[in-house]
Image (cartoon, helix red, strand yellow):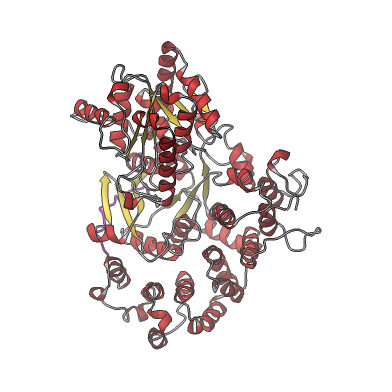
């Protein structure tokens, strides 16, 4: 395999993918022997390659990579071979098996697949592995054992484990002759089990909504990471804000009858509020998908909750009383693969938003490592698993769209060379995202005063000393995560001496320590260490817990008012932003904005025209970019903010975004089910 270090100027990850989908298009480059090269060899080069090449040391890594390579080539794997792989405890390998399984059934037939499962299930002794095997049978609707055989197995220890038992309940639910053997819901151990048994026995846990029965589309969109109403807390971010607004706007757009936004609901939330379906506005509902407390959450690398999430989606969406026309997924992970599988079962078209994440950082993070430790190798495995998930979603989708960035779709096609020929060579559509128009509250003035004074409240972990109220304010908003780089901004602010000339407000993260995830704790610890080393900065930093989007936007507006504090500026220090909803909201509020130059922000932010683009690769370059913005004359800042607000209002309203998405959704509507069936058969015949 030809590979290089980053210094050679070519990304080995990009070269491997380009050589796989378009052989001969990538440059021939010097060879290296790092961990990344070994993994790329295994995933993108065939075993009979003319030159010897280095492979990962771990046999599981080699097996996973071999299966992924086969699936990318649309090969079909024998059911016996897939079941051997499924017996592994590696969740990424099992996720790969799940992707291969439907084509295996189609090619080899139900009799052989059923026989293979009947051979393995009775002799399985591990509850988690048994759950996986049962889920494979459920996914392909195969009744592998009869009621008496399942009753015999129920007395054995493996099936007494929670994961296997719940997997069996889902399996029995799909077969009318077996469903009667399910326990009654009142025997359940918790709210999750009670709900599962209710649905498995044919009950509907919610009153079907009054969905319009017109000529428009019923759209389902997924928002599985974080809470849709808690941006900045945990894994919740700008996507939730965008999808909440987009769902509302789509529902009032011509050609769209209604929108269902899929969210997740854990067992605690089920106990507090068992209602799964909740109206958000006219024609827009959220539908909660229960998450088993003993499962990995399905979103993320190799989450074993994938089968459950797919089952819940199929069952609950079917309970709406109307088949969805299309399902739109946006993250490259097992959660989206689960929703995609449910879309196939429901007969709905699939739309996938592809982004070069984590693609764009794989080469720079891993190519230079000749010796990789356990943590770094695990990070590489997770990144490559997400890349694989994205490839499978691209292959499954009826429509792939991108997020506009600098250069249009060029960056996306660089990382997804299989998309180069889409739309006659034009590449995927890139509908713009947008923000909801801000509506002031009846008590807007009081809210502004409360939020502003809260920055100086002594109850915060750090609060701004009122005596420095007249200094310029740097504001950043977002979930606390290493990729958002709030700790790098704090370091830049201190090391450059900006903390002597300005204050810093960081909004994001949970107010409750017990709910903070490892990523948030890492960022908080890094900030705490910086403040401890520079105690003079503590009185000029406010670390504010996440707040509802309406309050964030209210705070931005009061900060933008002349005289409320010193000049306020918004800073986005992220490694990258696929689009940057928070940046658009700050521009709309009238704040001068500085944002990362990686990802989608340069598509609408022009350096020194309507904002400042930042090199966020180091604290030094980040500080230099912020200094450029702070050094502008007041008249130049005023002109910049006027142009920024005009940009948002002319091109990035939520209604404009909804119209663009609706046009794409409707554009594929005339493709018949027969055409999609023919496409699926074509994929199988290529294998």
Q: Quadrant of residue 276?
A: bottom left
Residue at the spot 31% in from the left edge and 32% down from the top edge: 463
Left or right of 297 in this view: 77: right
Query: Residue 124, image x and y in percent?
Result: 50, 81
Q: Which of the pair 390/431 is nearer the observer? A: 390
Residue at the spot 46% in from the left edge and 39% down from the top edge: 484
Name the quadrant of the C terminus.
bottom right
Report if residue 193 lies within the magenta region.
Answer: no
Farthest residue, direction right? 50
Query: Residue 491, image x and y in percent?
Result: 47, 33
Report if residue 208 lies within the magenta region.
Answer: yes
Q: Which of the pair 522/572 is nearer the observer? A: 522
Give the residues in magenta.
203-220
Is 135 located above or below residue 275 in the figure?
A: below
Query: Residue 624, image x and y in percent?
Result: 53, 24
Q: Which of the pair 2/264 is nearer the observer? A: 2
Can residue 438 be seen by looking at this rendering? no
Query: Residue 224, image x and y in percent?
Result: 40, 52
Is 263 located above or below residue 584 in the figure?
A: below
Can residue 668 be seen by looking at this rendering? yes
Q: Main secondary structure of the magenta part?
A: loop
Tag count: 0
Left or right of 332 in this view: 217: left
Left or right of 234 in this view: 685: right
Left or right of 341 in this view: 289: left
């Amino acid at each position: 395999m030809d590979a290089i270090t980053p210094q050679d100027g070519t990304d080995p990850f990009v070269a491997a993918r380009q050589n796989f989908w378009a052989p001969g298009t990538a440059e021939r480059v010097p060879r290296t022997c790092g961990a990344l090269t070994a993994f790329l060899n295994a995933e993108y080069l065939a075993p009979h390659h003319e030159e010897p090449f280095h492979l990962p040391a771990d046999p599981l890594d080699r097996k996973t990579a071999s299966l992924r390579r086969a699936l990318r080539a649309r090969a079909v794997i024998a059911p016996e071979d897939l079941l051997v792989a499924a017996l592994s405890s590696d969740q990424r390998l099992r996720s790969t098996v799940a992707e291969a399984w439907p084509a295996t059934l189609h090619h080899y037939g139900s009799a052989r697949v059923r026989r293979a499962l009947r051979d393995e299930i009775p002799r399985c002794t591990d509850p988690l592995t048994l759950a996986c095997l049962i889920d494979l049978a459920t996914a392909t609707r195969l009744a592998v054992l009869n009621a008496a055989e399942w009753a015999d197995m129920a007395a054995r220890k493996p099936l007494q484990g929670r994961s296997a038992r719940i997997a069996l309940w889902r399996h029995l639910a799909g077969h009318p002759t077996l469903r009667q053997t399910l326990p009654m819901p009142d025997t359940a151990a918790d709210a999750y089990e009670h709900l599962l048994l209710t649905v498995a026995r044919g009950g509907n846990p919610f009153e079907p909504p009054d969905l319009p029965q017109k000529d428009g589309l019923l759209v389902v969109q997924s928002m599985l990471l974080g809470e849709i109403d808690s941006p900045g807390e945990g894994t919740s971010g700008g996507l939730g804000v965008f999808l909440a607004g987009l769902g509302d706007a789509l529902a009032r757009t011509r050609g769209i009858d209604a929108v269902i936004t899929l969210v997740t609901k854990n067992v605690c939330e089920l106990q507090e509020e068992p209602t799964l379906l909740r109206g958000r506005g006219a024609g827009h509902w959220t539908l909660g998908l229960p998450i088993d407390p003993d499962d990995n959450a399905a979103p993320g690398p190799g989450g074993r909750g994938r089968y459950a999430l797919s089952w819940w989606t199929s069952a609950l969406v079917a309970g709406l009383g109307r088949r969805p026309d299309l399902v739109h997924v946006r993250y490259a992970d097992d959660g989206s693969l689960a929703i995609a599988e449910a879309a196939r079962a429901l007969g709905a078209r699939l739309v996938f938003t592809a982004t070069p994440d984590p693609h764009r950082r794989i080469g720079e993070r891993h190519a230079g490592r000749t010796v990789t430790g356990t943590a770094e190798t695990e990070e590489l495995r997770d990144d490559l698993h997400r890349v694989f998930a994205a490839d499978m979603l691209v292959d499954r989708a009826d429509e792939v769209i991108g997020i506009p960035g600098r250069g249009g779709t060029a960056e996306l096609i660089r990382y997804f060379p299989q998309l180069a020929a889409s739309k006659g060579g034009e590449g995927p559509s890139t509908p713009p995202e947008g923000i909801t128009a801000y509506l002031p509250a009846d008590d807007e003035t009081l809210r502004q005063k409360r939020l502003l004074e809260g920055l100086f409240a002594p109850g915060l972990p750090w609060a701004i000393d009122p005596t420095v109220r007249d200094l310029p304010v740097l504001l950043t908003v977002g979930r606390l995560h290493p990729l958002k780089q709030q700790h790098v901004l704090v370091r830049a602010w201190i090391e450059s001496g900006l903390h002597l000339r300005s204050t810093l407000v960081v909004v994001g993260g949970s107010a409750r320590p017990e709910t903070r995830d490892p990523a948030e704790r890492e960022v908080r610890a890094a900030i705490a260490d910086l403040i401890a080393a520079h105690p003079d900065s503590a009185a000029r930093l406010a670390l504010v817990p996440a707040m509802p989007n309406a309050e964030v936007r209210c705070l931005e507006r009061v900060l933008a008012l002349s005289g409320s504090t010193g000049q306020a500026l918004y800073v986005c220090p992220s490694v990258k932003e696929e689009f940057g909803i928070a940046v658009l909201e700050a521009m709309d509020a009238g704040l001068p904005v500085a944002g990362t130059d990686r990802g989608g922000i340069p598509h609408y932010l022009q350096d020194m025209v309507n904002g400042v683009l930042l090199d966020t690769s180091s604290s030094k370059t980040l500080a230099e970019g912020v200094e450029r913005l702070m050094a502008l004359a007041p008249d130049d800042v005023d002109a910049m903010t006027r142009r920024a607000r005009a940009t948002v209002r002319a091109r990035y309203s939520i209604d404009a975004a909804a119209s663009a998405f609706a046009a794409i959704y409707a554009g594929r509507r005339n493709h018949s089910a027969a055409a999609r069936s023919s496409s699926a058969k074509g994929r199988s015949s290529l294998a």
